[in-house]
Amino acid sequence: MDTKVMQKLSYGLFVLTAKEGDKDNGCITNTAIQVTSEPNRISIAVNKGNYTHDMVLNTGVFNISILSEDARFDTFKHFGFQSGRDVDKAVGITYKRSSNGVIYLDSPEVNAFISGKVIQTVDLGTHTLFIADVTDGEVLNNTASATYAYYFANIKPKPEAASQESKKGWICTICGYIYEGDPLPDDFICPVCKHPASDFKKL
Ligand code: FE
């Protein structure tokens, strides 16, 4: 089988936020989809390595901020390339709080938010699938939603050829992290964005 078929699936891009106690946190996800309309339900699959994963698991509520084509790479770095265990991700962003108490991004980079209340979880090994009732939401502007393909074509900076040539090893095609060694272990997980070895490309 050609594993590249998986790259032909289309995805959106979202900031998943949660709140536990006084702690706000968020991460980037591409797995939010509507699963039923009556009742209105969505699902998200979240990597267990994400701090936000545990917060959603413990509290059962979350928001999805839908990133638009105006989203900046800095926003992906802010929510995707660092952990809420190390930094306060609510600092340095513009947000509001929805009726469930969770923050959502209130910026031109986001065109809508959706609040979810978890009704079922499925353990998928590396990820947990959360199925949730939609409890709130608002359209913030009408800029087109960013797709995963749009992100790669227009938002993510192109790695500089020179810096790649100077290093040997494997580069994470998601965040640009370079593994300096060869071969790349099959079970390698990117320490920055938590994507698997299949998302690495040989330099
Ligand atoms: Fe990575």
Image: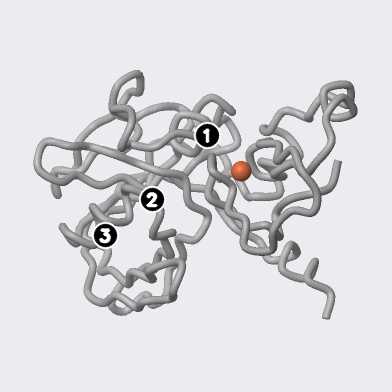
Q: Position of residue 190 (x, y in %)?
A: 59, 47
Q: How far apart are marks 3 and 1 (CA)?
A: 22 Å
Question: Which secondary structure lies at badge 3?
Answer: strand
Q: Mark 2 points at which residue?
A: 50
Residue drawn at 58 percent across, 42 percent down = 144
Of callouts 2 and 1, the N-terminal one: 2
Of badges 3 and 1, nearer the viewer stands 1
Q: Which amino acid does the dot numbered 2 rest on?
A: Asn
Amino acid carrying mark 3 in the image = Gly
Residue positioned 17% across, 59% down in the render? 58
The number of discs equals: 3
Q: Name the residue under label 3.
A: 116
Q: Quadrant of the C terminus?
A: top right
Q: Measured from the top left, where is residue 16 in percent x and y?
A: 37, 48
The x, y position of residue 200, in whole percent, is 73, 50
Q: Is mark 3 within 8 Å of ligand 1?
A: no
Picture quarter containing residue 21? top left
> Which residue is under mark 1?
76
Q: Is residue 82 above or below residue 102?
A: above
